[in-house]
Image: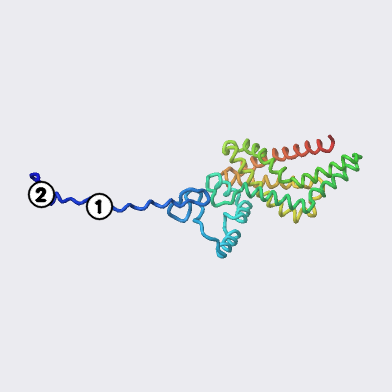
Amino acid sequence: MLLPGISAAATNTQPAVLPPAQAAPAAAERCLNCEQPMAAGNFCPGCGQPRPHRLSTAHVLHELVHVFTHADKSIFGFARQVLLAPGRVFADYAAGRRKRYFSPFQFLLLAAGLATLLSVKLHYYELIGENVQRGFQLRGASAEQVRRVGEYFAAVGKYFNVWWLSLVPVHALAAWAVYRRRLNYAEAFLLLVLVGCAFQLLLLAALVSVFLVAGREPGSSTAFMQAGVYVVYLTWIGRRGLGLSWPAAIASALAVSVVGGCINYGTNMLIFRWYVFA
């Protein structure tokens, strides 16, 4: 029996046919480096690593060539930049434009380690120590004191990188005091790291050239070279990286260099006298 107003066609209802269930979406591809989901594109949005691919001979050759030819980001490119354009490197790094550069902190560790290895192989500090020992003998020092002098200089050569790097944060305090109107401590530390990178590179060159002949006498060690590099490169960065006038850049560089030299000399003499005469 049909109800009024309802046609027969309406009564012949068929079961509703549901659309086929859609397959569950595949799990998002994750970066193999940082585990973040990979978005569309060639690079991970989290860490910037390219999409993974199997290594090939062509890829390895490209990476090797890239190390030597990349203008800025390679270790060799950074060496050139820190020697020839330290002001721009400092300004870029302090402003946040860091992707283009090899890490200056890592570079300093590597350069200081290489300089230490080279000085040990060349017996640089041991030869200076022998000259100091002869001076002590002429002044009538005891055999024990003469022996300790040799041990001290041998240790300085062996742990030169530890000694030198441990003083960088202290030198940065001096730089912070001098440039406090423009830099915070972290930026002052970066400033000294860049100058240190330049010094270690020049030291490597000097160890295999000038210091083989002229750098073995007491008082002709790396101290004067470091002072000169500090003055030149702090002036350079002050002028090009901080926008100081030439007089202000030179005066600031001299102030940091003098304080740094006093710190080096005072620390060295205290440890030397304690070890030799204690």
Q: x and y percent of residue 265 in the render?
A: 75, 39
Q: Residue at x 55, y 63 (%)?
A: 56
Lateral position of residue 15 relative to residue 30, left or right = left
Question: Mark 2 sits on what residue?
Answer: 7
Q: Label 1 sits on what residue type?
A: Val
Q: Are marks 1 and 2 in contact (CB under 8 Å)?
A: no
In the depicted view, which residue is nearer to us: 149 or 247?
149
Where in the figure is residue 221, as x and y percent of width and height?
77, 47
Q: Amino acid at mark 2?
A: Ser
| Residue pointed to by mark 1 | 17
Q: Is residue 275 left or right of residue 23?
A: right
Q: Mark 2, residues whose alpha carbon is within 10 Å: few (<14), some, or many (≥20)? A: few
Q: Which mark is residue 212?
A: none
Residue at coordinates 75% horizontally, 56% vertically from top-left?
209
Indicate left or right for 168 with 59 as reference: right
The local secondary structure at tag 1 comes to loop
Dot 1 or dot 2, earlier in sequence: 2
The x and y percentages for residue 144 are 88, 40
Q: Residue at x 62, y 37 (%)?
A: 176
Task: Give the distance between the C-alpha atoms of the residues marked 1 and 2, in whole angstroms.
Answer: 22 Å
Of 69 and 255, the residue lying toward us: 69
